[in-house]
Amino acid sequence: MIRPLDWVRWIKLKLGLVLLLSGLASLIVFRIGIGWLPPATSITAIAVALLTSQVLAHGMTRPLREMTAAARAMARGDYTRRVRATARDEVGQLAVAFNQMAADLDMADRQRRELIANVSHELRTPIFALQAVLENIVDGVEVPDPGTMKTALLQTERLGRLVTELLDLSRIDAGAIALDLQAFDVAAFLDAAVREAEVNAAAAGREVRFTATAPAVTAVADPERLHQVIANLLDNAARHSPAGGQICAEARADGADLVIEVADQGPGIPAAERQRVFDRFTRGSNGATRADGGGTGLGLAIAHWIVQMHGGTIAVLDAPGCRIQVRVPAHT
């Protein structure tokens, strides 16, 4: 449908033009209709004026009708409807804002559906594994020896990790997490994170080696939250490293920033996926197998939020294997 006044930027000017053009149309009819009977000329002029105003006003009100229909569709759960936004006036700006709102709601609805599906899947896997272990013990197929109980413990820990990550994600979204900034020794901090990663890797049966390199400096940050970030990076590196692989954790001061890098000898992350790995419930194409316990796909998303809360950045570097760099203000 033609909208002849879309180029006008103000709706008040549009209304003025509608009246002006309608009046001109009437005058033209009177001019052409000289010699007609006055009643016929008047009726024709009025009809032409009404027709002209209807044609011109149609393009002004059509976006409003489309927005009404789209809003009703949204109420039914359909977020795919969009409004044609070609006008440059206030109605056109409203249509652009409406389309952006519809797109945001559509994305939020998809994320909600994905969240439910992913959380259900992540919960089901360890629950079914734990259920199988307990049923075998009850049926006498297995005895509750240390090996069997260790399997049950690992699945329970996986459930606990997922619940903790979901709670952290909920607190972050709600803005309920506040940083507890304090001075800490960087070398001792990194060494403690690596020692913990070694214990976890050994418990999971991963044959990897860890090294830690850090200067004897003091930084100011939230050590508990920063430990959560580094622990996640070390755990991911252990999952993706080959047997006998080496994982290097390095820290250094770079101007006013504290830089921590974790590198492994695994297959690495393809360049096309390096930014996407920080999205929620995202696993790279080279992710750990289900037999390895997999990952929740939340750890890097939470790490990204924590680093951002510190005013820093986290990124996958272009290097052999996988090297992830965390950069935060050190406030030394």
Image (cartoon, helix red, strand yellow):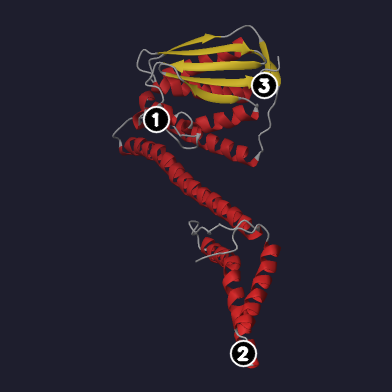
Q: Which residue is tagged 3? A: 221
Q: Residue at x 59, y 32 (%)?
A: 305
N-term mark: 1 or 2? 2
Q: Are marks 1 and 2 in contact (CB under 8 Å)?
A: no
Instruction: Return the x and y of residue 48 as percentages of the image width and height.
Output: 59, 80
> Which numbered mark, 1 or 2, is in the foreground of this view?
2
Q: Which residue is tagged 2? A: 35
Instruction: Return the x and y of residue 258 as percentages of the image width and height.
Output: 62, 16
Tell me the quarter of the picture where residue 257 sits. top right
N-term mark: 1 or 3? 3
Image position of 184 with respect to 6: above or below: above
Q: Which mark is residue 280?
A: none
Instruction: Return the x and y of residue 293 as percentages of the image width and height.
Output: 39, 30
The quadrant of the image that shows the C terminus is top right
> Which numbered mark, 3 or 2, is in the foreground of this view?
2
Q: Which mark is residue 293?
A: 1
